[in-house]
Image (cartoon, helix red, strand yellow):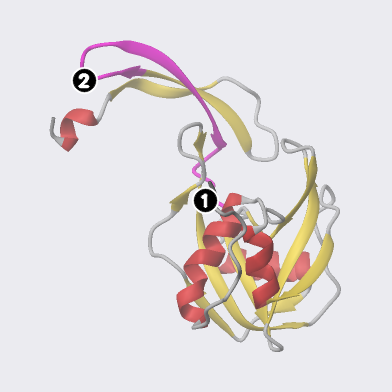
């Protein structure tokens, strides 16, 4: 079977079936598979093609800056890098600058786009994709001013500690993990972390 034969047909337009909340809603689509089978598919996503932006901040001292906040779906505190959705007609870079300033009170010296394509976050059920940046030389210029629905604790971690936290499952946000992995080649460092699991143990 060729790749083109794997692609189903969307019948009609996506229908928004839940009143939007904070720019997100639920959609219903009618899908027809290549074998003719039709079914309804439900997905969660953003309205008006809103796409979030993530930025991995590295301070002038070489530390990663992360925010910790309660996430309703996970029902727990989650450690992640700053990020958010555009306001109005902001570009991705403008979103990155605004979110870093709001959530961390910081500005950067250099900003690097980590991949030219947007990355899907759990594409089986979410129609949300995001752009990732690495920000070098971040420095504090003001106190954080998060949105009224955000209650954030700010943290700094040395790079080796940050990667270790990811491997130990202390950092669980997929967007943050992917952004970190994409940034590694720009950081030019390697880590000697002992294996967590012994898969060869009899």
Task: Residue 94: give x, y in percent of width and height.
Answer: 58, 68
Would you name the residue on which mark 2 appears?
Answer: 34
Q: Farthest front residue? A: 202
Q: Nearer the viewer, residue 143 or 157?
A: 157
User: Which quadrant of the figure contains the N terminus?
Assistant: top left
Residue neighbourhood size for the residue with mark 1, other residues' Cα within 10 Å, grouped as few (<14), some (14–19), many (≥20): few
Identify the disc placed on residue 199: 1
Identify the disc placed on residue 39: none
Number of numbered discs overlaid on the protein picture? 2
Task: Residue 38: give x, y in percent of width and height.
Answer: 32, 11
| Left or right placement of residue 85 versus residue 147 in this view | left
The kind of secondary structure element at disc 1 is loop
Whether residue 37 appears in magenta in the rendering, the answer is yes
Quarter of the figure with residue 46: top right
In this orientation, does residue 91 appear?
no
Q: Which residues are magenta?
A: 31-52
Inter-mark Cα distance, 2 to 1: 40 Å
């Amino acid at each position: 079977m060729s790749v083109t034969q794997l692609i189903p047909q969307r019948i009609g337009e996506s229908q928004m079936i839940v009143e939007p909340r904070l720019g997100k809603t639920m959609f219903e689509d009618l899908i027809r598979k290549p074998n003719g089978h039709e079914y309804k598919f439900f997905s969660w996503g953003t309205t008006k093609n809103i796409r979030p932006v993530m930025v991995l901040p590295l301070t002038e001292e070489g530390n990663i800056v992360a925010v910790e906040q309660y996430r309703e779906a996970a029902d727990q505190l989650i450690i992640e890098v700053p990020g958010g959705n555009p306001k109005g007609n902001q570009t991705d870079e403008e979103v990155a600058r605004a979110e870093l300033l709001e959530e961390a009170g910081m500005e950067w010296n250099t900003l690097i786009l980590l991949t030219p394509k947007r990355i899907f976050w759990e594409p089986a059920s979410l129609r949300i994709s995001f752009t990732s940046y690495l920000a070098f030389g971040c420095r504090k210029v003001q106190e954080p001013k998060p949105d009224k629905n955000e209650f954030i604790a700010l943290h700094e971690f040395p790079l080796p500690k940050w990667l270790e936290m990811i491997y130990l499952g202390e950092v669980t946000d997929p967007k943050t993990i992917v952004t970190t992995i994409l940034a590694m080649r720009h950081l030019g460092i390697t880590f000697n972390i002992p294996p967590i699991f012994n898969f060869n143990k009899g």
